[in-house]
Amino acid sequence: MKLLQDIIRLTPFYVTFFWGIIFILNKAKENRARFGLGIFMLTAMVVYFSHAVFFKHDYTFYFKIDGLYMLADLSVYPMYYLYIRLLTKDITFKKEYLYHFIPAILLAVLFEALNLFASPAIREAYLQEVLLHNRWPVSMSHSLLQPIAFVYVVSRAVFGLQSLIYLLLGIFLIRKYNKRIANFYSNVQGRRLAWLEMLTITLILTAVASFLVNMLGRHFFEKHHLLLFPSLIFSILLFVIGFLGSRQNQTIVNVVLDENEEDIVYGDPDNQRLLKEKLLTLMEKEKPFLQPQLRITDLSLRLFTNRTYLSNLINTEFSMNFSDFVNRYRVQHAKALMDKDSTLSYSLNYFSEVSGFGSVSSFIRAFKQFEGTTAGSYHFKNTKKAS
């Protein structure tokens, strides 16, 4: 049983070490976001290694790495946020990233400096009163114990603020990115970061729960045998982040390259009414929506207008983004085919392909969105009427 507990306790370390090495071995220039994710994983690895040392009761070794633990612990959420930035906003690493680690560096250096001058008795009192039982030390009031405890408490407060602020900022960036690609691509499957948004929301809930439980002290985890639960939860979350991150090839770099591919600025744009008429005529007569990889630049070039102006027109005149605008035509086209060929048992995959959708799952989702019923149900009713 003890062996199993040790394995589970070390699982977050194994997971972060595994993904960290895999991502770091990739060249940063090939996928900067993935390289950034590797740095995040290795930073988290240091944190979970320190946890494992502490809960193995190897306090002598733990005190040697306590400053490193504080540095890594206060760098985890900034690193996760910077990973999201490299996916959704920044096309390269920036010097301003260093500003996010100033609190971690300052507190870790101060904490380590105080510990260098602390006696074994002070370290023991710090361990028993602060780390294990989460109590403000009243003994040795004229020693270094209280300054060390103060830095520790400040670090916990900074960590709590970081977890909330950086994760919320990450969600904001993800939603802004998803909105951007929905206004540029007609098929957004494989480009959206809905999975990362859900994981980030889960991380917020987990971080809040961990922070509240941590207020009770580390001794609480061992006393009530609760240590295995956070280990398992974070192991699963970190593995999923690593797995899905390894499959996420689309980043803001790809979007910027696509947006600049046909970066032609024409003269004064047409007035909005005339451009709207030309757009509707193009969609109805030439049916460009049947092209699975249709982009807004493809339409702006054919309409001799600016991409941004056309995107704004679609947003304001039709109250939807470019992807939904195109998919609405695709759904109508699929419905017409179903009505016309109701006696034939074509698959949904067939209707998806001939209507311009990139996948059958995108077709099913869009059909439900615009028609209020599933594509399968609609097709079944048609075939049943015809029989």
Image: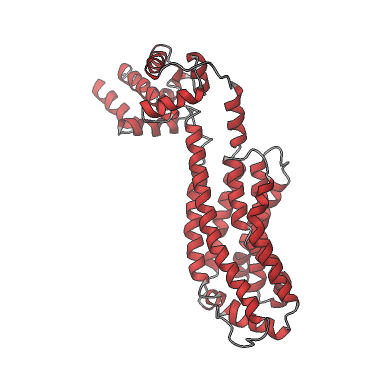
- Give the image location of residue 180, x and y in percent: 50, 34
Image vertical order of residue 40 relative to residue 269, above or below: below
- Give the image location of residue 35, x and y in percent: 68, 45
Instruction: Please state if 333 lies on the left or on the right of 122 as rendered.
Output: left
Specify the quadrant that holds the C terminus.
top left
Give the residue furthest to the front: 268
- Residue at image position (62%, 80%) is 146
Image vertical order of residue 283 relative to residue 33, above or below: above
- Give the image location of residue 310, x and y in percent: 46, 23
Nearest the eye: 201 or 238: 201
Give the residue furthest to the bottom: 139
Specify the quadrant that holds the N terminus.
bottom right
Nearest the eye: 352 or 266: 266
- Give the image location of residue 84, x and y in percent: 58, 46
Q: How many numbered dots are placed on residues in this image? A: 0
Instruction: Please state if 29 lies on the left or on the right of 3 as rendered.
Output: right
Residue 42 visible here: yes
Image vertical order of residue 102 relative to residue 139, above or below: above
Image vertical order of residue 245 relative to residue 62, above or below: above
